């Protein structure tokens, strides 16, 4: 599996270390199903663009499943659909169907370690992009610098909170910390 690392200096002074992967090489459906079935209470589902951040905290998901290539996570209060596999693109014309199917599906992902943050000195996440290189989703992992009620704890970080991050990177990318 080809994994590419890149360090980016962000405009706000933070640094992000990306560990990119091609979705063809990773079972994205299995990874997301594992995250939402096993770790649902520990992650925050977000969408981040400059000027807006949406954060969703899940109660226990009532359903995690796939239909027409779309992974659905349904908590009862909210749900999300994410194209992780082949979809029919039924409404597309014959000439645009293949392109639309390619655009909709997860094309690449990255595990991201960010440093020099304002709320916490570091953060860990998973981001996925579609075939148009548009961000689809960002999943924030447990942070050693935050208590269970998300209060800062810089003096006594709980490093065991990175176990999920390490386990998923090892299982799906072969990256050992």
Image (cartoon, rainbow, N blue to C red):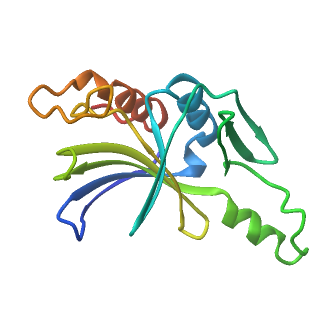
Residue found at x 32% / y 25%:
148
User: Would you say 108 lies left or right of 89 here?
Assistant: left
Q: Nearer the viewer, residue 39 or 89?
A: 39
User: Would you say 73 lies left or right of 51 here?
Assistant: right
Determine the residue located farthest toward the left in the rendered image: 155
Q: Quadrant of residue 155?
A: top left
Picture quarter with the C terminus? top left
User: How many callouts does the rendering have?
Assistant: 0
Residue 22 in the image: x percent, y percent?
52, 53
Residue 7 in the image: x percent, y percent?
25, 59
Residue 86 in the image: x percent, y percent?
76, 52
User: Would you say 149 lies left or right of 102 here?
Assistant: left
Residue found at x 19% / y 52%:
118
User: Would you say 85 lies left or right of 163 here?
Assistant: right
Q: Quadrant of residue 78?
A: top right
Determine the residue located farthest toward the bottom in the rendered image: 95
When the figure is inspected, residue 48 is found, relative to residue 146, above or below; the finding is: below
Residue 93 in the image: x percent, y percent?
90, 75
Residue found at x 52% / y 29%:
40
């Amino acid at each position: 599996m080809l994994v590419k690392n890149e360090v980016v200096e962000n405009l706000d002074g933070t640094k992000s270390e990306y560990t990119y992967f091609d979705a063809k090489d990773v079972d994205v459906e299995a990874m997301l199903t594992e995250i939402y079935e096993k770790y649902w209470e520990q992650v925050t589902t977000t969408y981040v663009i400059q000027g807006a951040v949406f954060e969703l905290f899940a109660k226990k998901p009532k359903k995690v499943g796939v239909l027409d290539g779309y992974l659905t996570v349904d908590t009862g209060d909210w749900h999300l659909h994410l194209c992780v596999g082949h979809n029919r693109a039924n409404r597309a014309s014959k000439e645009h169907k293949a392109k639309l199917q390619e655009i909709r599906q997860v094309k690449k992902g990255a595990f991201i370690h960010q440093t020099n943050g304002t709320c916490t000195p570091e953060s860990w996440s998973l981001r996925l992009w579609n075939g148009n290189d548009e961000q689809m989703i960002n999943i924030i992992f447990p942070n050693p610098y935050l208590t269970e009620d998300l209060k800062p704890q810089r003096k006594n970080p709980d490093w065991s909170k990175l176990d999920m991050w390490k386990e998923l990177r090892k299982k799906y990318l072969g990256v050992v910390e």
